[in-house]
Image: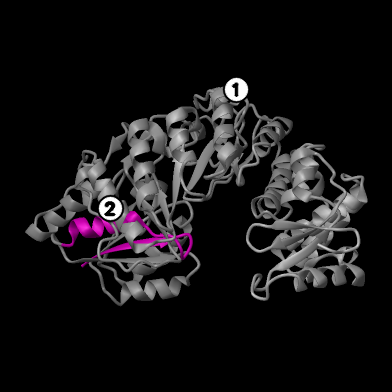
């Protein structure tokens, strides 16, 4: 029996590679696939493998599971001495068998043709010889999730193309040429399956989804027509967007599409060094157009540690990125992946990097270890504060007066992201009070209170921001004026001005408002005497 084995980084992830191989080979030779994750005990996984007594075990290997796979292959080989172990995946693409004591085969590149040939040889009883294989015809790819029961808690991955037209020196996808596409009728039939099953998140793994504009628009329109509740994740190259595809995206229902957009840097010398051709002016225009309608969830990526970008230069890129006010900003750190051009150029740029996965940069000629460490602390704050909307309106008010990167850098010395929400919010409030970033205390008090109540119960407010008995009476009186079942159990807050008008328009409207936080907040004006 041939056992295909996936070791994912999280329980919610699914592996399409082992599913492809299983469906291609199951009629040729007895096979099975198992799926685990790195948070499970290695002994439990080893037991599940050994009890099946497979003759062959094939494992997909990535930077997140390679150390796990090393231990697992040792256990398999010592317990099942005659079992043949086959490794594939991006983490072994540059390895040899000398690098893997317990492996018998290493498959480089795509695995479909290899496993079809391998299983045909096994079924005929022929001796198998490793060959150079042609790229697999995507039209012949089986649907990976056929006959599976869909789990609403999992992320489902799907590809409509392979390869990337770009040559970014830090990315393994730049090696995969040319770009190939699955037929659209096949794509439509298969993604309709996900929509009919009402899966929560469908993530396209196409490296550049919008490389062909007309094709991308057809898929977008199909998703708009048939997706009821499924969110669709797409990796977009912003310089290839134009009015037509932006219009198609901007006329979708709210939250249908989640767009991952890699900016990486705004520094031209940096982009040239990594062979990333970017029209920065066009990228700027296109992101702003996507943000105008706010129909799509926008996720923007930056990479720290690239050539020619020092600490201050990266902060400039970070400021420009945050000022789009996208839904999420990911501050990533360069990984010197095996097989990439930038790893071959490590001496040219003075790179020091981890010798073990994920091969993250430690320093280079342009940025020190201490500065990268500082960025890591800032990254943790960006994720917890900005991405999770913990201080949505407060941050926007501050960022109109103070550079975001300076704010996060200063805050990183004062606040520990690992604290529980109550203590974290209290530390934030103390920092903002003492730093005087918002000089008007009434504005700070109202903004911070608004942001906390948008997410948390009233007892999460710092003590200074708890409501007085008189204010509580005003809120109670307001509740009595509403229909009994109109608000089931919403959070209500009393504020001294229109929060959104202050932040968006810069107008301080000195009237009292009660905001109801029931999904999207909405407000009611209250007279100074407390009558609505």
- Seen in the picture, residue 155 relative to 266 is either above or below; the reply is below
Q: CA distance from mark 2 to mark 1?
A: 40 Å
Residue 3 lies in magenta, yes or no?
yes
Which residue is drawn at the image coordinates 65% and 41% (left, top)? Answer: 325
Tell which of 13 and 28 is nearer to you: 13
- Span shown in magenta: 1-26
Judge whether residue 348 can be spotted in this image: no
Q: Residues within 10 Å of mark 1 (few under 14, many from 20)?
A: some
Q: Say whether residue 473 is left or right of residue 308.
A: right
Q: Is residue 81 magenta?
A: no
**Residue 402 visible (yes or no):** yes
| Quarter placement of the N terminus | bottom left
Task: Say above or below: 181 vs 7.
Answer: above
Q: Quadrant of the C terminus?
A: bottom right
**Front residue (pair 225, 514):** 514
Question: Considering the numbered disc 2 on the image, is that residue within a helix, a strand or a loop?
Answer: helix
Q: Which residue in the rendered view is the most extreme toward the left? A: 124
Q: Quadrant of residue 20?
A: bottom left
Q: Name the residue located 77 percent from the left edge and 73 percent from the top edge.
A: 480
Q: Which residue is mark 2?
A: 190
- Residue on which the image places disc 1: 268
Answer left or right for 139 relative to 229. Answer: left
Q: Secondary structure at mark 1?
A: helix
Looking at the picture, how far across and down is residue 505, in whole percent? 76, 38
Residue 70, relative to residue 225: is it above or below? below
Q: Position of residue 8 (x, y in %)?
A: 43, 60
Residue depth check, mark 2 versus mark 1: number of the one nearer the observer? 2
- Answer few, some or many: residues within 10 Å of disc 2's Cα (few below 14, many 20 plus, some between 14 and 19): some
Toward which corner of the image does residue 163 lie, by quadrant?
top left
């Amino acid at each position: 029996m041939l056992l295909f084995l996936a070791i994912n980084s999280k329980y919610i992830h699914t592996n399409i590679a082992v599913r492809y191989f299983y469906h291609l080979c199951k009629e040729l030779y007895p096979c099975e696939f198992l799926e685990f994750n790195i948070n499970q005990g290695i002994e439990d996984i080893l037991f599940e493998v050994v009890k099946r007594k497979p003759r062959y075990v094939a494992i997909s290997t990535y930077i997140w599971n390679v150390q796990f796979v090393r231990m697992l292959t040792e256990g398999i080989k010592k317990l099942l001495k005659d079992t043949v172990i086959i490794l594939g995946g991006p983490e072994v693409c540059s390895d040899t068998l000398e690098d893997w004591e317990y492996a018998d085969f290493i498959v480089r590149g795509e695995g479909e043709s290899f496993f079809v040939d391998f299983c045909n040889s096994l079924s005929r009883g022929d001796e198998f010889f490793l060959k150079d294989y042609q790229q697999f015809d995507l039209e012949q790819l089986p649907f990976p999730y056929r006959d599976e029961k869909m789990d609403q808690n999992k992320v489902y991955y799907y590809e409509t193309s392979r390869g990337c037209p770009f040559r970014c020196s830090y990315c393994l996808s730049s090696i995969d040429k040319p770009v190939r596409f699955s037929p659209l009728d096949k794509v439509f039939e298969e993604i309709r399956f996900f929509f009919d099953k009402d899966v929560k998140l469908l993530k396209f793994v196409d490296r550049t989804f919008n490389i062909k504009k007309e094709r991308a628009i057809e898929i977008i329109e199909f998703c708009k027509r048939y997706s009821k509740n499924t969110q669709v994740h797409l990796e977009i190259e912003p310089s290839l967007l134009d009015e037509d595809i932006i219009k198609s995206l901007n006329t979708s229902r709210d939250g249908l599409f989640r767009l991952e957009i890699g900016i990486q840097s705004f520094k031209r010398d940096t982009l040239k060094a990594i062979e990333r051709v970017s029209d920065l002016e066009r990228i700027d225009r296109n992101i702003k157009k996507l943000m105008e309608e706010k129909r799509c969830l926008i996720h923007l990526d930056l990479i720290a540690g690239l050539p020619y970008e020092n600490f201050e230069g990266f902060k400039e890129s970070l400021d420009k990125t945050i000022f789009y006010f996208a839904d999420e900003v990911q501050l990533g750190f360069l990984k010197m992946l095996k097989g990439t051009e930038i790893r071959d150029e490590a001496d040219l740029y003075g790179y020091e990097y981890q010798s073990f996965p994920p091969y993250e940069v430690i320093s280079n000629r342009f940025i020190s270890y201490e500065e990268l460490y500082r960025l890591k602390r800032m990254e943790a704050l960006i994720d917890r504060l900005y991405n999770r909307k913990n201080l949505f309106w407060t941050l926007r008010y501050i960022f109109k007066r103070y550079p975001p990167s300076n704010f996060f850098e200063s805050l990183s010395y004062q606040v520990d992201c690992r604290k529980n929400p109550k203590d974290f919010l209290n530390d934030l409030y103390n920092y903002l009070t003492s730093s005087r970033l918002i000089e008007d205390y009434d504005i700070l008090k109202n903004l911070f209170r608004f942001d906390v109540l948008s997410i948390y119960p009233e007892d999460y407010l710092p003590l200074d921001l708890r409501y007085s008995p008189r204010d509580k009476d005003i809120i109670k009186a307001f509740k009595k004026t509403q229909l009994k079942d109109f608000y089931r159990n919403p959070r209500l807050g009393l504020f001294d001005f229109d929060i959104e008008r202050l932040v968006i328009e810069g107008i301080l409207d000195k009237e009292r408002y009660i905001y109801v936080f029931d999904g999207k907040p909405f407000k009611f004006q209250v007279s100074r005497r407390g009558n609505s």
